[in-house]
Image: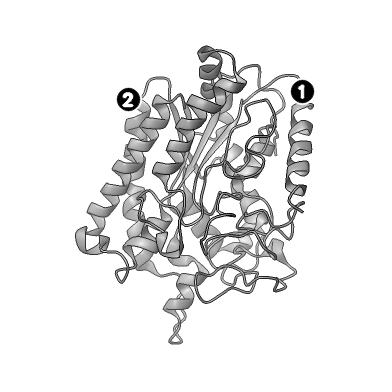
Amino acid sequence: MATKPLSFLVLLCISFLTKSKAEHVAALYVFGDSDLDNGNNNQKPTLAKANYPPYGIDYPEGATGRFSNGFTIADYLAEFLDICQPPAFMGPMASAGKRPRGYDYASASAGILPETGTIVGPNLNLTEQVRLFRKTVETILPQRLKTPEAISRHLSSSVFLVSIGSNDYSTNYLLPQSSNSSRLYNPDQFAELLINQLGNHLQEMYRLGARNFVVFEIGPIGCLPTTVALQNINGTKTQCVEKQNDLVSIFNAKLAPKINYLTSSLQHSTFVLVKTFDLVLGLVENPSRYGFKDSRNPCCVISNTIGTCVPNKTPCEDRNSHVFWDGAHHTNAVNRFAAKEIFNGTSFCTPFSLLNLVRQHAPLTSPFRNYRNF
């Protein structure tokens, strides 16, 4: 079983590379939490892992560590860009192949702050993820690219996804019994702390060679099934916990000007900001508008501890009609919808879509002809 993900992803990578002799976007580098984790937590002693059924029930190789029934947003963006899915840096595919293909450093329960999420076990916080990227640039890429100029071209032709911050609220600021951050900072101060830390990490990634960034807002964590269930334990019928949504909205309001500042101050950088909050809130409040039926109930049977799927329990059959897969993560269908919006939509990205970024702003290695249009 351990070799199956390796064989599938190698074949998938080969299929992308043989579609065209031209290399368009060089690679995808992924930073974040469980929404983008594709297996980095599998060997960690943590509750935050998804390497067991029914996770991956609709993924070709089954449960790989992805927190969904199928693919992640990063997986779909790689497909739309006709490039290889980036392997988990801590996984068995990390050293496979001789071509630089990017990496996924995302780790479930991780946050911008080092202490975030550790209540459920160790993770790769954003500082550690950037450290692993530095290792990639300084140690791994020189083994596969012959010159510093080649490394620079590779990185400046790659796309960097960054989706992190929700755990800094859900498993840090909003847990006063295990964290003192809510006593040290008021909501505005805490958001400012996170924004400054995130900005520092993005600048470090830029110094290491990153140029093309796709940065995600924090979604409406007050609408997650686990959050709503706790609020409604006494029989109330709340659809979303507005207090939690208001907290992350403070962060999101500060994120846009930070991204604008980085765009203007980091020469030759390009940033796309994904309006995750509005995207997910629209799905929750009006699922039928986007082709979904159920935006309140998780598809799998979830545990009462952290809202992950109970192992080996049969999930719902109509997975494509559900917004939520487990207590905090989305179904494959939602991930595909979100990826399409990020790639070439007009409503949830600013100042433009990822497709417009790679067409107009990325110094691509060759003409971008084979993009997936919808």
Residue at image coords 56%, 71%: 296
Q: Nearer the viewer, residue 291 or 60?
A: 60
Q: Image point 52% across, 12% down: which residue? A: 149
Vertical placement of residue 202 versus 157, above or below: below
Q: Position of residue 132 (x, y in %)?
A: 48, 37
Image spot of residue 266 (x, y percent): 36, 24
Query: In the structure shown, which secondary structural element does the residue marked by tag 2 occupy?
Result: helix
Q: Depth check: 289 or 304 in front? A: 304
Q: Earlier in the sequence, mark 2 or mark 1?
A: 1
Residue in view at x 71 percent, y 19 percent: 22
Hey, what amino acid is under mark 1?
Ser
Across and down, in percent, residue 367 comes to 66, 17
| Horizontal side of residue 2 vs 263, given as left or right | right
* Numbered badge on residue 265: 2
Looking at the image, can residue 176 be seen?
Answer: yes
User: What crowding class fits label 1: few (fewer than 14 Cα within 10 Å), some (14-19), or many (20 or more)?
Assistant: few
